Image (spheres, rainbow, N blue to C red):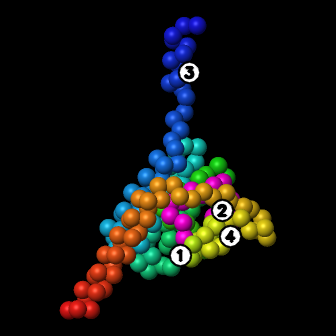
Amino acid sequence: MSDEGFFEDEVDAPITFSDEHYMRMAIRQAEQAFQAGEVPIGAIIVHEDEVIAKAWNQVEMLKDATAHAEILALTQASAQLDRWRLHGCTLYVTKEPCPMCAGALVNSRIDRVVFGLADDKGGGCGGAFDIHDHDGLLHKVPSEGHCCEEDCRLLIQSFFKMRRQAQKDKKNE
């Protein structure tokens, strides 16, 4: 076997990244939300090892209760692929999707959800609700949590600590 053939195969091999790699990209989106004064949740959608959507929470900026990172990313991904069924896609999001977002994920037929921080009180992907895996729905979305969980937790905790301090300072003026 010649060396030439070996190296050709290696060059043509697709690059595949890990869940952690993509979650770090979602965390960068969450950091943008933080800087904009939004709850720091970021999301990206990957299709065939290519990022096709990036978003962060924009509820306050857009004055829209549905402007969650997941919803904005779903809209971008659908536009990018020119279809609403997101087969072959994975969503990476820094916090477990809420029930609204979990429902949208089910309806989009996305293949998989990977989240960072679990939400036992309001999560829709196994935390408080199992919308992603509900027997009565036509589609189920496998989800996995705890990817880069500590980094996601620290970002959200820092945001709310800062917000509480600002409210306390305002009250003391």
Residue 12 visible in image: yes
* Residue under label 4: 131
Residue at mark 3 to residue at mark 2: CA–CA distance: 36 Å
Label ID, residue 66: 1
Q: Which residues are magenta?
A: 104-119
Secondary structure under badge 4?
helix
Earlier residue among tags 3 and 2:
3
Vertical comparison of 15 with 95: above or below: above
Image coords of residue 173 (percent x, y): 20, 92
**Mark 4 against mark 2, which lies toward the viewer?**
4
**Mark 4 against mark 3, which lies toward the viewer?**
4
Q: Is residue 125 magenta?
A: no
Please rate how many residues cluster around mark 4, counting C-alpha atoms within 10 Å: few if below 14, some from 14 to 19, many from 20: many
- Mark 4 vs 2: CB contact within 8 A: no
Earlier residue among tags 4 and 2:
2
Q: Amino acid at mark 4?
A: Ile
Image coords of residue 8 (percent x, y): 53, 19
Image coords of residue 74 (percent x, y): 57, 62
Q: Amino acid at mark 3?
A: Asp
Label ID, residue 108: 2
Is 130 situated left or right of 30 in this image? right
Vertical comparison of 32 with 50: above or below: below
Earlier residue among tags 1 and 4:
1
Q: Residue at x 67, y 57 (%)?
A: 142
Residue at mark 1 to residue at mark 3: CA–CA distance: 46 Å
Between residue 61 and residue 92, name the one nearer to us. Answer: 92
Q: Residue at x 25, y 88 (%)?
A: 170
